Image (cartoon, rainbow, N blue to C red):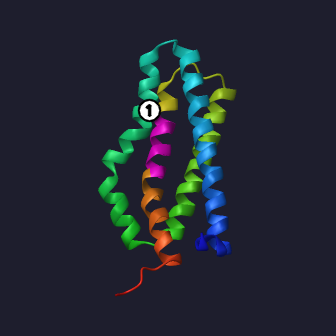
Amino acid sequence: MEAFASTDFRRFQLARVVAVLGYASQSVAVAWQVYSITHRAIDLGYTGLAQFLPGLLFLLPAGHAADRFDRRRIILICYGMQALCTGALLGLVLAGAHRVFSIYVVLFFIGTSRTFSGRPIRRLYLTWFPRPIS
């Protein structure tokens, strides 16, 4: 509980909670939209695949990027990319898109940005709370 004494840590955790809630809400909304377009359950599986596949494909490059570049910058870029992708999904809905392939492409980019942001986020904890040297 002493971690919450740090103002930076509290802000970071609040931002993460908001991001996770937003991502979960977006996932439900996108799945609902895809199903309303196709009326096929298999297409719901493809939405999950489009978000999961980048995690497998880019696992090693994401780890390399997290070790080589500034972690805060990676996180900002990835969150910015997720915001742009959310705007793209909104644009597709407002345009009345009746094909789900474009939705899958946007979901792939969201999955990619989540893959690249995951490790730097976990590594930031170490900068706040370094392990004691024995």
- In the image, residue 38 sits, relative to residue 89, either above or below, namely above
Taking the magenta stretch, the answer to whether it contains residue 108 is yes
- In the image, residue 96 sits, relative to residue 63, either above or below, namely above
**Picture residue at 42% right of the left edge, 27% below the top:** 46
Q: What residue range appears in magenta?
A: 105-114
* Numbered marks: total: 1
Asked which secondary structure carries label 1, the reply is helix
Can residue 22 be seen in the rendering of this structure? yes
| Quarter of the view holding residue 93 | top right
**Picture residue at 40% right of the left edge, 40% below the top:** 52
Q: Residues within 10 Å of mark 1 (few under 14, many from 20)?
A: some
Residue 74 pos. (x, y %) = 50, 64
Q: Is residue 72 left or right of residue 55?
A: right
Quarter occupied by the N terminus: bottom right
Taking the magenta stretch, the answer to whether it contains residue 110 is yes
Mark 1 — residue?
Answer: 48
Residue 54 pos. (x, y %) = 38, 44
Can residue 70 be seen in the rendering of this structure? no
**Picture residue at 59% right of the left edge, 23% below the top:** 33
Dominant SS type (magenta):
helix
In the image, 12 versus 49, the foreground residue is 12
